[in-house]
Image: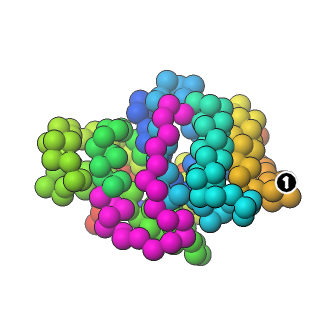
Amino acid sequence: MTIETILPIPDIFSARRILCIQPHYDDNDIGAAGTLALLVQAGAEIDYLTVTDDLMGLVDHSLSPEAGADALKHDQFMAGEIIGVRKQCWLGYPDAGEYSYHSLRKDILRSIRQFSPDFIFTCDPWLTYEAHRDHIQVGLAVAEATILANITKITSGDPALDAAYRGGIQGIAFYMTREPNLTIDITSTWEKKVAAVHSYMAQFDNASMAEMIHALDAKSLQLAVGHSYWRGEALKVLHPSALHCGI
């Protein structure tokens, strides 16, 4: 038997301020919208930070970069209203493009110190067979920034912000994971998740959207097998200390 960590799984429902950091504009909702809607209902404030500009995934190739960005943000705001997202922010890194990992980590570190969350959500960078570099880099940079946030000698580029930061991250939740340690009953928020995902039409045509909803439907039902609820959502939830040296 492998002992992953001696630390207990942090309680996501104790979180009051949650920062959800995603590679692309729809990842938070595809991966965790049901849970995030429940957390909003429980009184948490939730902010979304999107790392890339998402322009490579647009289905309408005739759109200019400016028009494409407007379409993407329109989708995000519609979905955010459904889930209850308080604020949307963007870093603007090139979608599926070339960028520095350390620049990304620095920008994420600055965002963590600005928002001062007590819980962070992101995609699992260690997902088996994950081939999209944006997901790997973003998930890893978020994980590393989480454990480095309290070391203010590692600068975010804003000395005043760094000096004022007081920490307080209780845990990190990875969605899109194959090694969950927590399954959430999202039966009551399933329709909200579906409606939020349906908002992302700038990157889906009708057929691909139907395929996505079908896949999410099957997965949610699979995760609920053996439980008293109908639909589940899987997370890997860890104390920040579990992200270094296998504590």
Q: Amino acid at mark 1?
A: Asn
Task: Give the side of residue 126 with respect to residue 216, left or right.
Answer: left
Task: Give the side of residue 100 with respect to residue 150, left or right.
Answer: right
Total marks placed? 1
Mark 1 neighbour density, 10 Å: few (under 14) some (14–19) many (20 or more): few
* 246 relative to 80, above or below: below
Residue at 30% in and 52% down? 109
Residue 151 makes an appearance in the image: no
Q: Position of residue 240 (x, y in %)?
A: 33, 52
Residue at 13% in and 55% down? 153
Q: Position of residue 244 (x, y in %)?
A: 30, 63
Residue at 28% in and 43% down? 113
Foreground residue, 53 or 246? 53
| Residue that badge 1 annotates | 206
Task: Give the side of residue 179 with respect to residue 209, left or right.
Answer: left
Question: In the rendered structure, which segment of residues is drawn in magenta?
Answer: 85-106
Q: Quadrant of the C terminus?
A: bottom left
Residue 18 makes an appearance in the image: yes
Residue at 16% in and 41% down? 160
Give the secondary structure at mark 1.
helix
Task: Give the side of residue 17 with respect to residue 226, left or right.
Answer: left
Q: How is the image coloured?
A: rainbow
Q: Position of residue 94 (x, y in %)?
A: 49, 65
Foreground residue, 184 or 156? 156
Asked if residue 98 is among those painted magenta in the image, a careful observer would answer: yes
